[in-house]
Amino acid sequence: MRTKEGVSPEDWDKLNARVSRQDNVGTGTMKIRKGDKVKMLSGKDRNKTGKVTFVFPAAERLVVEGLNLIKKHQRARQQGQKGQIISKERAVAVASVQLICPSCAKPARIGHRLEGDKKIRYCKQCQMTI
């Protein structure tokens, strides 16, 4: 059974995705971070780009701004208030997105290298740091 380790209660609701019931789904490290610009590789939003808003390393999923939208039917909470249909972003697998390099503006693979005592990410096409 999955637990909410490492995820705040507010973010857990945003994860909102089905994950396999294995205990060790992910390693907890990802090459894509919050704020990165990514391109969708599969699904209904294929070839669209957006900015990463939430990252869930334990589940190897992330939320991309404006992509993978679902319709949520919200019922009225108080008398006299109307129910409504809300569009929400849903988490996608890390494998279905690719980072867009800020310097060469192309979808690229990411590498790691050590500069001094810091581990940095770099674009494997243009060799620039990300």
Image (cartoon, rainbow, N blue to C red):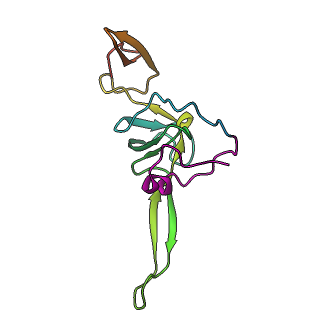
The x and y percentages for residue 16 are 54, 55
Q: Is residue 94 left or right of residue 18?
A: left
In the picture, residue 108 is in which quadrant? top left
The x and y percentages for residue 113 are 40, 12
The x and y percentages for residue 104 are 32, 22
Q: Tell me the magenta residue range.
A: 1-22
The answer to whether one can see residue 124 in this image is: no
Q: Image point 44% across, 17% down: which residue?
A: 111
In front of the other: 39 or 4: 4
**Magenta part, dominant SS:** loop
- The answer to if 4 sits in the magenta stretch is yes
Q: Image point 34% across, 38% down: which residue?
A: 35
Q: Image point 31% across, 27% down: which residue?
A: 102
- The answer to if 60 sits in the magenta stretch is no
Residue at the limit of the structure toward the bottom, as seen here: 80
The answer to whether one can see residue 35 in this image is: yes
In front of the other: 85 or 23: 23
Q: Image point 63% across, 51% down: which residue?
A: 18
